[in-house]
Amino acid sequence: MKREWDLLHTPGPTPIPPSVERAMNQPMIGHRGQKCKDLLKSIAPRLKPVFGTSGEVLVLTGSGTSALEAAVVNTTQPGDEVIVVVAGAFGERFAKICETYELHVHRIDVEWGRAVEVAQVEQTLKSSNQVKAVFLTHSETSTGVMHPIESIAERINELSDALVVVDGVSSVGGSLLDMDRFGIDLLVSGSQKAMMLPPGLAFVAMSERAWQTIQNNDRPRFYLDLRSYYDRLGEGQTPFTPALSLLFGLEEVLQLMEEEGVQQVSERHLLMQKMTRDACRALNLPLLVSEQEASTTVTSIRPQTFEAEQLRKLANEEFGLILAGGQKHMKGEIFRIGHMGYCRPANVFQYISVLEVLLKRLGHDFDAGAGSAAAQEAYLQGTREET
Amino acid sequence: MKREWDLLHTPGPTPIPPSVERAMNQPMIGHRGQKCKDLLKSIAPRLKPVFGTSGEVLVLTGSGTSALEAAVVNTTQPGDEVIVVVAGAFGERFAKICETYELHVHRIDVEWGRAVEVAQVEQTLKSSNQVKAVFLTHSETSTGVMHPIESIAERINELSDALVVVDGVSSVGGSLLDMDRFGIDLLVSGSQKAMMLPPGLAFVAMSERAWQTIQNNDRPRFYLDLRSYYDRLGEGQTPFTPALSLLFGLEEVLQLMEEEGVQQVSERHLLMQKMTRDACRALNLPLLVSEQEASTTVTSIRPQTFEAEQLRKLANEEFGLILAGGQKHMKGEIFRIGHMGYCRPANVFQYISVLEVLLKRLGHDFDAGAGSAAAQEAYLQGTREET
């Protein structure tokens, strides 16, 4: 089937709004000229509310992983003690980067599909008084778990001076992370998930305290040296040639978010999560993650009566509905639905109905239309005050 | 709500596939250069299967109405007797054009929401032996009726030498009109419905017999003189500057149709019609048109328990779902759903679920999820052989 007909519901990349596509399809500009300065100066202040910070948000040209690495190399020195919460593939990646950079890593391993408990972080933190930073994933894309960042950050800040570093790749733009209020020091993200852009931009938001650490850190680094990005920001510049068409698109993304309202964007994601989960329950589809631990942007299902990969294949072939599979040891065990970015309740209705058809084909037992009815009821409950 | 979020389900204009948008967004070319000749020569033969003809399909730059007018002015002379079937706003338009050009019009008025019967055409035809042409609408967009063109054309051809002229504006590309086999002499259409393009192109397909009449007709005409279009076609030219970006798009539309298969495109439309109608019945929504008389591209609903206009307003405000209202005396009486062109079963699932939510808001009585279940069942029935 041609891409034209696809219903892209992986947890990133996600569909691009037409106005963002149009914004990206503009003539190139010189990256040292006034037009680029104007663009960067338009973007910089408008990123702040999305990250919930009054501090600066730096824009790097790179995959989300480049921002994870930037967070590590800019805040630590070899031998530093750090804590990394590993509850899925992206926690694992943070740990791997920390190990690569010769840190002394205290891993907190959490069962995939579960969130870390505040007490676990607290206990590990208390086992050493040398911890320089705690690395956490907000929405663990590989499982659809959302860790309780607010409570964890609060506890870390009470107990230590460790920096709180959060991977918000699949949550920023899809779940309000009030960085300053939560006490997060570094919040990093990428462009291709709730930010409604193609991959290629990475974001690093910093607290004043993080900036002090970064400034005084003499670990060698060049492309990912956040000092160069910060120093150029005031002049409306980037240290290296930026992915200009993505910046054109980002300006339009911010426009769309402002028109809807950042708070409303977050509420829409929560509503889509509830619709999806309620529908899954009505369809007798076992959810991997509990209600309290569920991500607002991605939902994982661990089917019992059919093969996850068979469903994904059928969805792709028959409807162009692109779902994600499990990662690492969860491959074949689960399938994942992304509901973030350029996605709205009407898209949830659509994939639930499509799932119902596919489940019928697979001989899965449920009441016809029960998933659609549940998604509709969740929508009506969640929007009752608007009527 | 921004256009970005709209679910456009009027019976034309219809959504544009992204690859068609991209095709249209290409640099202008000279309309007398080789590139334009190549483009027109690529398009001309590939339009024929869409119209079900081995004859030529002329492309005019204009609204669909320009093609209706071209059909009239090219085939008739003042005072000629013609029959016009009037069963809605577009039959009415054909009649008006015929009257404007001083024809002697025998109207066959049919109740809005009903199809004409073969016997009615037969009877009118027998009342005069001077009828030069019969003007018919295939899919009457204003009501969602599809007239039995095949049987009517067959009967006209048995009984007379009258040309059979069909308005296929909302059917060509959405319902296989096998023009040559059905015995249709002129089949006209527009770009903005099942042809998946913006408005601006009009099509006229001609039989050999129609071409003879047109050639020998000395009624004054200039922009709509089909002789100029026909004469230039062989050279890969148009008589006047064509809407080039729409031609770029048309080439891609034909590519999409060929990849899916013209027969399959037609079957998809029939499937979407069945899904929509079955869902409406399950939702206790009264259909304006009977099963036998229903269009494959547009479905009209005449609600009894709420105001059609209130539903349309709510659909637009809450979901960006754009539905059409009634026309002329049916304004406020009915609402119409377009399901044609760049529209697939998953879109039907989507608007049915959205309708269910809106009907709940309006207090309409139905079993939760019943419409979704019915649409899914119709889909499964219609695609059973593929499993």
Image (cartoon, coloured by chain):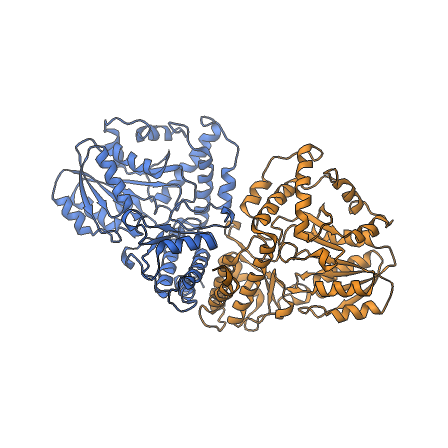
Chain colours: A blue, B orange
Looking at the image, is A100 positioned above or below residue B170?
A: above
Give B337 or A39, whichever is nearer the viewer: B337
Q: Is residue A209 visible?
A: no
Q: Position of residue A81 (x, y in %)?
A: 17, 37
Give A87 or A76, whichever is nearer the viewer: A87
In the displayed structure image, the side of residue A331 where residue B43 appears, left or right: right
Looking at the image, is A13 positioned above or below residue A37?
A: below
Identify the residue shown where x is 37% and y is 52%: A266
Q: Position of residue A352 (x, y in %)?
A: 42, 60
Q: Position of residue A73 (x, y in %)?
A: 26, 32
Looking at the image, is A68 positioned above or below residue A15?
A: above
Give residue B277's quadrant in the image: bottom right
Looking at the image, is A336 positioned above or below residue A30?
A: below
Give A28 or B225, whichever is nearer the viewer: B225
Task: Count how many numbered circles sit on residues in the image.
Answer: 0
Give residue A104's quadrant in the image: top left
Q: Position of residue A62 (x, y in %)?
A: 37, 35
In the displayed structure image, the side of residue A61 where residue A145 appears, left or right: left
Give A42 or B377, whichever is nearer the viewer: B377
Q: Is residue B117 visible?
A: yes
In the displayed structure image, the side of residue B101 where residue A189 appears, left or right: left
